[in-house]
Amino acid sequence: MRLVARAHGVAVPREHFLSADASPDELPDFFPALLKPNQADGSVGITQDAVVRSRDEARRYLRWLRETLPGRDVLVQEYLPGPEYGIGLVGNPAHGLLALPALEVDFSRLPERLAPILSFESKAIPDSPYWTEIRFARAALAPDVEARLVDWSEWLFRRLGLRDYARFDFRTSAGGEIALLEVNPNPAWANDGKLAFMAGFAGIAYRDLLRAILDAALARVGA
Ligand SMILES: Nc1ncnc2c1ncn2[C@@H]1O[C@H](COP(=O)(O)OP(=O)(O)O)[C@@H](O)[C@H]1O
Ligand SMILES: [Mg+2]
């Protein structure tokens, strides 16, 4: 996904791939970095300690990852510390793609000692500040910047052969550049998920979001 995106001029974070059997000596030495399993979902393997600022911290987190999720390859990415955005698309290229208003993750209430990321705690540990203190808001992006993120997302939707709905996650680098973090071909469509929030920003009720996804699928299959 990163290579396809980069070929189209979409910025992506610097990344190093560490295979499951690689020696910890192969850890790169750019910091701050974020370590995560290459094969996982729902922030499994991305805890509050995933953001590392030194070789020692990186080795410690790698050891923990390998104990907890044995046999997984690991991605070491440049940590992007700036605002995090989501772009939601519903539909299909042949029948029209609807771009929902961009979402921004509001980390401002999170205690400063915690790295601002949508960690595993934010998705699975209800009494963690990651769960209680993070909000989703309508992004305050300049219209041309939001339009560029939507363009990139639509292009990736086609290029990667996605269907019916998808969510594209971006985050801003230390230098202020917005880079693609992740393409979600089947993002959560729960009523408290990002996609439902985005629909809400557009005044689209939850049931109508679900209907739009189903209509997109039916139109595609019917065609
Ligand atoms: N390179 C990175 N820089 C900054 N934050 C990151 C980076 N990678 C992941 N994150 C944070 O971790 C969260 C989950 O990571 P992600 O790669 O999207 O995994 P998942 O598939 O589990 O959602 C992101 O929403 C973001 O907050
Ligand atoms: Mg994600």
Image (spheres, rainbow, N blue to C red):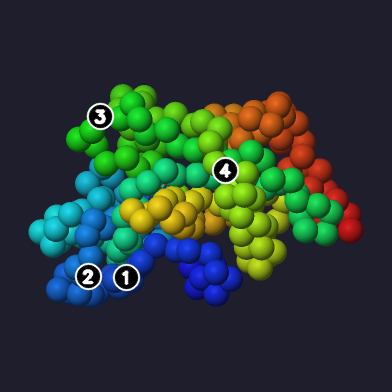
Q: On the picture, is 202 further left or further right than 19? A: right
Specify the quadrant that holds the C terminus. bottom right
Q: Residue at 35% across / 43% down in the picture? A: 117
Q: Which amino acid type is shown beneath numbered disc 4?
A: Ala
Specify the label residue 142 is tagged with: 4
Considering only order in the chain, which callout, 1 or 3, is on the residue closer to the N terminus?
1
Q: Secondary structure at mark 2?
A: loop
Q: Residue at 10% across / 59% down in the picture? A: 56
Residue at which label 3 appears: 111
Specify the label residue 150 is tagged with: none
Whole-number angstrom distance, CA of label 2 to CA of label 3: 29 Å
Q: For mark 2, does the 10 Å Cα neighbourhood hold few (<14), some (14 to 19), or many (20 or more) residues?
A: some
Q: Secondary structure at mark 4?
A: loop
Specify the label residue 16 is tagged with: 1
Q: On the picture, is 86 further left or further right than 59? A: right
Residue 13 spot, x, y in % from top left: 39, 62
Considering only order in the chain, which callout, 4 or 2, is on the residue closer to the N terminus?
2
Do callouts 4 and 1 mark residues in contact (Cβ within 8 Å)? Answer: no
Q: Which amino acid type is shown beneath numbered disc 3?
A: Pro
Whole-number angstrom distance, CA of label 4 to CA of label 1: 32 Å
Whole-number angstrom distance, CA of label 1 to CA of label 2: 7 Å
Residue at which label 2 appears: 28
- Residue 28 seen: yes
Do callouts 1 and 2 mark residues in contact (Cβ within 8 Å)? Answer: yes
